[in-house]
Amino acid sequence: MPGGRTSPLCPCARQREDGEGGSYPVESVRSEDAENGHALRMSAGRASGALMIPVPGVDLCRTPWVRWRWRVLEWPEGADGRFAARDDQAIGTYLAADGVVCRTSLAYRWETDTPVGATGMASYVDGFVKVRRTCLRNSEGGEGFVVEERNVAVDWTRQLGADRLRG
């Protein structure tokens, strides 16, 4: 994310250049219920926030598993990924293959009203970015931190095709 000021708590996070809200979209915070006492907190208000980390050289055929812990503190009211006009989620983990502004993405989302297990296509930036989404949890999905573990190679092949697995 070029420009902006670096967060003193999380060097990979930068404040938005437009200064909206005056806070860092991603910050490192102390959290007693996090495994190591620290967590990343993202606030986006009525927008989207992102923390993008390139991980070059990953071979999903050899190392297909991804594991993360997440929790939701606030739900977007009436959000449902099945409908473009209501497409929003509390939090999502997006995996992309085509660079920072990617055309191929797989998303694991914790949504508000979308049924668990629902899948589909979401399109952004006038159709330039297309995301295959899967709702792993919704507002009935519990409280506190939850551990997710997914075989990305299986999910990628199922939703995007085996030819996209190797780039």
Image (tube, helix red, strand yellow):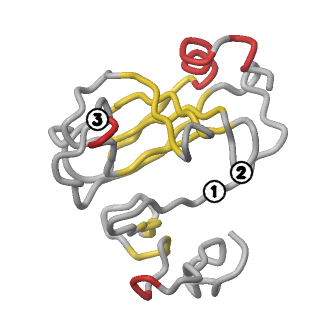
The quadrant holding residue 164 is top right
Q: Quadrant of the C terminus?
A: top right
- Depicted 119 relative to depicted 111: above or below: above
Q: Nearer the viewer, residue 138 or 80?
A: 80
- Depicted 111 relative to depicted 152: above or below: below
Give residue 52's mark.
1
Which residue is most to the front?
A: 126
Q: Nearer the viewer, residue 29 or 153?
A: 153
Disc 2 marks a residue whose amino acid type is: Val
Q: Are marks 3 and 1 in contact (CB under 8 Å)?
A: no
Instruction: Please give the name of the residue rendered at 18% of the width and 43% of the height, measured from the top-left corner.
Output: 139
Q: Are marks 1 and 2 in contact (CB under 8 Å)?
A: yes
Decide: few, some or many residues near mark 1? Use Cα within 10 Å; few <14, some 14-19, many ≥20: few
Q: Are marks 2 and 3 in contact (CB under 8 Å)?
A: no
- Image coordinates of residue 75 in percent, x first then y, are 22, 54
Q: Earlier in the sequence, mark 3 or mark 1?
A: 1
Is residue 103 left or right of 122 when viewed as pictured? right
Name the mark nearer the viewer: 2 or 3: 2
What residue sits right under mark 3 in the picture? 137
What residue sits right under mark 2 in the picture? 100
Decide: few, some or many residues near mark 2? Use Cα within 10 Å; few <14, some 14-19, many ≥20: few
Q: Earlier in the sequence, mark 1 or mark 2?
A: 1
Q: Quadrant of the N terminus?
A: bottom right
